[in-house]
């Protein structure tokens, strides 16, 4: 290692130039749940139900197992790189810079697809309020809305996000109450009524189940953001790991209850009027038109916030790539001086979102997003295995530490294997489109760096705007 810089030493010596460690375990869990959102499985519910032949809760639980193992790897890697907190950094430093670049390129796809699928879903949900307005008009409206607000530098505060998360939790509680009333009022059901959501032999298909699982994993996307707060956490070596795992666990339990309740209300034999907004129709069946409108409005507001934040995040990632000359710097590496934002990139992502809303379905966009996410998850598991098991570890006092198969090898290997299996079960359309994106990035990176023999981009992670 090189000699520490004077600037770094000064920053260390001057407490005013360091982030304060004031976040507790509880703060981290609340932050994680806000990022993931209490209503996470609702927008994707219909798509998963259609793909898995109704076994939505089973897909949520299988995905949770993969996420829990991956969360352990994220938490352990955050110990090694407390100021980085990003998959491409872990992979690039622990495995190989070229693999880190590939991971970063997959993350770039995720960042740009998130506002795209938000545009699609918001347009479908708004159509439930005003069906006389065509879908294409809503697409134009929401793509323009996200772009205009980001160009003006409008951001939601953490306090507003906490209020919104609390309101969403209250709406979920109301939904549970109405489902309870609906189920109690039903005539006597057969013995399989309460178990068929988990396994219905009449509709079960292993292939369909794992295809649905590859989409249901979207429910958990965002939990890894906890690792970006490492520098502000009390006892980060313990709390980052615990918070990441607990966030995945709480999300999985809540999501399972939400989709189980929905499956009790809406039998698999009954088709949804619109697969993309299926959950609002479930709410309407359970509680009537008022609950339909309440759930529709709640999810619409949540998705508008997510779309805005993800568009700005994508714009910042593209700026990092442009600044480091991985993309044309004159366009992507420019900051608009008045608002201090990468305005060109905001417009670019807005155009991609609008074009994509016309060219693809919500299902394909969600699967492509998961295509990139699982590449990152597999990379983090591999990096954790390499660091904590393959290499000889040392404490700060240089005392050798013995490797532990159950602690150092099993979680990352299990996480990698399950993530790989789910990734392989993505539909061929998603693998084809995602593979084309990855191939383009790899070829471009190889050309730019003469076979990855030079640095291409640091892939600076944009601050989470959610």
Image (tube, grey):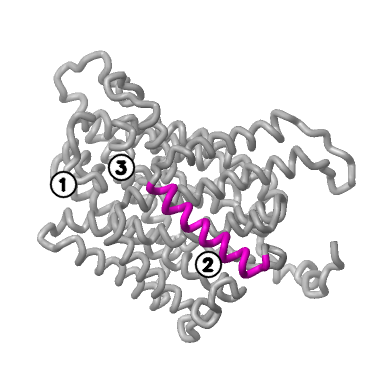
- How far apart in space, not on screen, are marks 2 and 1 (Cα)? 40 Å
Could you tell me which quadrant the N terminus lies in? Answer: bottom right
For the stretch drawn in magenta, the main secondary structure is helix
Q: Is residue 387 left or right of residue 245?
A: right
Q: Using residue 353 as the reference point, say whether residue 370 is left or right of it.
A: right
Residue 329 on the magenta segment = no
Q: Earlier in the sequence, mark 3 or mark 2?
A: 3
* Residue 44: image location, x then y, percent: 33, 45
The earlier-in-sequence mark between 2 and 1 is 1
* Residue positioned 75% across, 38% down in the render: 389
Residue at image mark 3: 47
Which circle marks residue 290 in the picture? 1
Contact between marks 2 and 1 (CB within 8 A): the answer is: no
Q: Position of residue 215 (x, y in %)?
A: 39, 42
The quarter of the displayed image where residue 55 is located: top left
Give me the disc on residue 317: 2
Q: Nearer the viewer, mark 2 or mark 1?
A: 2
Q: Residue furthest top?
A: 191
Residue span colored magenta? 429-450
- Look at the picture and state if 344 lies above or below 213: below
* C-alpha gap between disc 1 and disc 3: 24 Å
Neighbours of disc 1 within 10 Å: few (<14), some (14-19), many (20+): few
Residue 444 belongs to the span the image colors magenta:
yes
Residue occupying the point 33% across, 48% down: 363
């Amino acid at each position: 290692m090189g000699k520490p810089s004077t600037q770094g030493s000064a920053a260390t010596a001057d407490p005013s130039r360091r982030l304060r460690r004031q976040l507790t375990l509880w703060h981290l869990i609340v932050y994680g749940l806000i990022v993931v959102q209490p209503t996470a499985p609702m927008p994707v519910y219909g798509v998963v139900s259609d793909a898995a032949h109704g076994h939505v809760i089973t897909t949520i639980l299988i995905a949770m197992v993969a996420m829990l193992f991956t969360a352990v790897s994220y938490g352990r890697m955050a110990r090694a790189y407390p100021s980085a907190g990003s998959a491409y950094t872990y992979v690039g430093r622990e495995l190989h810079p070229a693999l880190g670049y590939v991971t970063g390129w997959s993350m770039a796809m995720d960042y740009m697809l998130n506002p795209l699928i938000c545009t699609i879903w918001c347009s479908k949900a708004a159509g439930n309020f005003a069906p006389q307005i065509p879908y294409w008009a809503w697409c134009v409206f929401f793509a323009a809305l996200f772009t205009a607000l980001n160009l003006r530098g409008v951001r939601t505060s953490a306090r507003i996000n906490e209020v919104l998360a609390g309101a969403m939790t209250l709406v979920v509680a109301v939904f549970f109450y109405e489902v309870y009333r609906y189920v109690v009022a039903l005539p006597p059901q057969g013995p399989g009524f309460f178990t068929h959501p988990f396994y219905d032999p009449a509709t079960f298909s292993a292939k369909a189940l794992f295809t649905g699982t590859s989409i249901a994993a979207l429910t958990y996307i965002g939990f890894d953001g906890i690792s970006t707060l490492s520098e502000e956490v009390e006892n980060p070596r313990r709390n980052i790991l615990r918070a990441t795992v607990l966030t995945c666990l709480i999300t999985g339990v809540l999501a399972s209850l939400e989709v189980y309740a929905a499956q009790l209300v809406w039998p698999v034999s009954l088709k949804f009027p619109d697969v993309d907004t299926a959950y609002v129709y479930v709410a309407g069946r359970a509680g009537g038109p008022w609950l339909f409108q309440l759930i529709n409005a709640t999810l619409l507001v949540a998705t508008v916030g997510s779309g805005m934040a993800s568009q700005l995040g994508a714009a910042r990632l593209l700026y990092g790539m442009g600044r480091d000359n991985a993309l044309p710097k004159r366009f992507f590496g420019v900051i608009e001086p008045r608002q201090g934002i990468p305005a060109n990139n905001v417009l670019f992502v807005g155009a991609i979102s609008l074009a994509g809303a016309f060219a693809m379905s919500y299902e394909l966009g969600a699967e492509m997003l998961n295509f990139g996410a699982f590449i990152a998850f597999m990379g983090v598991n591999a990096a954790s295995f390499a660091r904590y098991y393959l290499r000889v570890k040392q404490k700060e006092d240089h005392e050798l530490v013995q490797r532990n198969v159950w602690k150092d090898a099993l979680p990352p290997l299990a996480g990698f294997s399950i993530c790989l299996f789910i990734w392989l079960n993505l539909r061929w359309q998603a693998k084809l489109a995602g593979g084309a994106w990855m191939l383009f990035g790899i070829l471009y990176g190889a050309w730019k760096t003469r076979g990855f023999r030079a640095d291409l981009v640091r892939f600076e992670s944009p601050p989470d705007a959610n």
